[in-house]
Amino acid sequence: MRPTDRLGTLIQALRCLPGVGPKTAQRMAFHLLLRDREGAAALAGALQGAIQHIGHCLECRTLTEGELCEACADPKRDSSQLCVVENPAETFAIEQSTGYKGRFFVLNGRLSPLDGIGPDELGLDLLEAKLKSGTVQELILATNTTIEGEATAHYIGEMARHFRVRATRIAYGVPFGGELEYVDGTTLAHAFNGRQNL
């Protein structure tokens, strides 16, 4: 049996979510329609409201309902520290895990020439203006450890050096509780080369 046009459209729409293939999208659609229509209506309303009312913070580019996010509107945050991350979810992870109280800058991506993502798409002109202002004393590069993330960190680090701003990179390597014999060679090499005094 082939899905109806509306059911097919719903299944196709659910496939836009990361990690959701055709079978998972079909399972989700049938669940929402057969078992949880109330949940489906709440989901549709929440999505519509989010699309209409959530945009980007004018200062850090994270997601927010107002012109400024809560962190950028807080005068108690340390403006001398600026942490650069690839996406808004990483700001939450860093604050919850580390208690970081500086400011953030969200790239909403990473340099990827093959995908057509260059400095303009990442808002690096806004970041450059922040570095030029003289307020930022330390730029913390917290991009992911992918090839694109490393290239992005290098590019931004060079930009920081141009404005004589100290650029630091978050440490990475052996996970807590990890055993060295199971850690891949590249990770182990980075951890070994980035060792610190005790």
Image: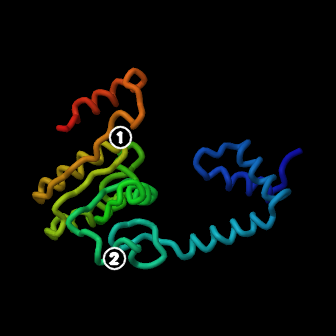
Q: Which mark is residue 74?
A: 2
On the rendered structure, is 195 left or right of 113? left
Examine the rendered structure and indicate whether residue 101 appears above or below residue 156.
below
Q: Position of residue 86 (x, y in %)?
A: 38, 53
Inspect this view and state whether residue 121 appears. no
User: As drawn, which residue projects farthest toward the right?
Assistant: 1
How far across and how far down the image is residue 133, in percent? 16, 70
119 relative to 132, above or below: above
Quadrant of image for the N terminus: top right
Does label 2 or label 1 sit earlier along the sequence?
Answer: 2
Q: Is residue 18 left or right of residue 101?
A: right
Location of residue 145 (image quadrant)? top left
Instruction: Give the secondary structure at mark 2.
Output: loop
**Residue projecting furthest to the front:** 198
The x and y percentages for residue 74 are: 34, 76
In the image, is 81 to the left or to the right of 176?
left
Q: Amino acid at mark 2?
A: Asp
For the residue labelled by badge 1, is the local secondary structure a helix, a strand or a loop?
loop
Quarter of the image for the C terminus: give it: top left
| Image color mode | rainbow
Q: Which mark is residue 145?
A: 1
- Identified by mark 1, the residue type is Thr
